[in-house]
Amino acid sequence: MRNDAPPARPIVTISDLVIEFRTRRQRVRALDGASLSVAEGEKVGLVGESGSGKSTLALSLARLLPTNAEHVSGDLTVAGKSIFAMDTASLRAVRRRTLSYVFQDPIGTLDPTMRVGRQISSVLNGVSQRSAVASSLLEVGLTDHKRIARSYPHELSGGMAQRVSIAVALAAKPQVVIADEPTASLDASIRAQILDLLVSLCAGHGTALVLLSHDLRAIAHYCERVAVMYGGRVVEDGPTANVFSEPFHPYSRALMKAAPGQERLGGRIEPIPGVPPILGGREERCTFAPRCRFALESCHSERPGEQRTAGRRVICHRVEGGLPPLPR
Ligand code: ATP
Ligand code: MG
């Protein structure tokens, strides 16, 4: 069958982005040349151990980084416009209309002083009719919409508050939603419902979704593409099914072997030895080399470049050298 669909255009393009945090004691390079692109309507999972730079990458998208963050180099465009070159008015427009966020703690994210209905209508660009608020709340499964619209965030359960955050995030019909651990603070029994809701609403609106999570099973289930971060770089990125069944990067392989659920698939959980790096500047080696079972000499002394192979982007000297696939 011929596929006549035009290729999806990128809505987000991140190229070699370097972000550092200044603290009184040190400089932390949270992103050390991160690259990623997200196509319109695409669902991309972002995974990696704590400190790998996922949230820094996510916050960079709307320049929402804390004040001690510095954009050192690299470019980031959203809907074709460079975020770091933008004036305040254009940035505000991007934040209102083009992309939005769903964070881990919904009650902390919503404005505690404003009723839910007003928070939704304030995103609707002046459209303050009750019917628009009602349909937003109904869309996220809150059938008791009149009561919810009159409530303050602290009067809601965690699950209801996260449904409201999703309604707020989608109200302006953005082109991208970034969800940073959107279910981590919720009761395990409702996590799947909330993720199902978020993913299906994004799909229904044609909105791209960038989902940051430590839950690899959820990423495998919901996302068509996965990007694996380590040491402030996206070290592997490709179709989820391929990356999960045959990871090219030793770190991707190690991350999957360390994930709960392995034991049910006939494997066993293998923790990754050592600890993730905290970078003080540009690294002229592979930052995973000290923990890597497959490291070559060059991994300790040369910064690996990007390889494109079989629909994947990988940053690894082994792949660069055309070495055989990693053992399972
Ligand atoms: P997690 O899975 O724990 O959420 P993450 O992948 O989101 O981790 P980031 O929060 O992006 O990681 O952190 C990347 C690096 O930047 C870490 O070394 C972190 O300590 C550092 N960092 C993050 N925010 C700040 C800050 N405001 N000031 C100083 N360093 C920071
Ligand atoms: Mg984070």
Image (cartoon, helix red, strand yellow):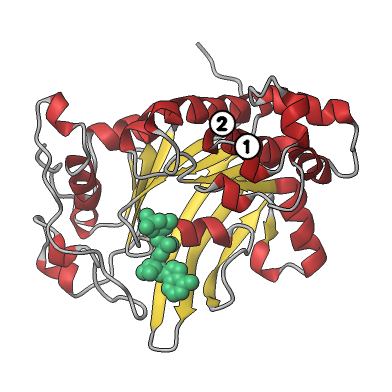
Q: What's under tag 1, amino acid-wise? A: Ile
**Secondary structure of the residue carrying numbered label 2:** helix
**Residue 166 - label:** 1
Residue 114 left/right relative to 225: right
Residue at 57% x, 24% y: name it.
Answer: 200
Figure check: 189 above or below 232: above
Q: What's under tag 2, amino acid-wise? A: Leu
Measure how far apart labels 1 and 2 are at the Cα level. Answer: 7 Å
Q: Residue 125 appears at what percent x and percent y?
A: 86, 44
The residue beneath circle 2 is: 198
Residue at 65% x, 49% y: name it.
Answer: 110
Q: Residue 246 appears at what percent x and percent y?
A: 22, 36
**Residue 218 - label:** none
- Would you say the residues marked 1 and 2 are in contact, meaning their CB atoms lie under 8 Å apart? yes
For the C terminus, which image quadrant? top left
Figure check: 8 above or below 24: above
Residue 290 left/right relative to 129: left
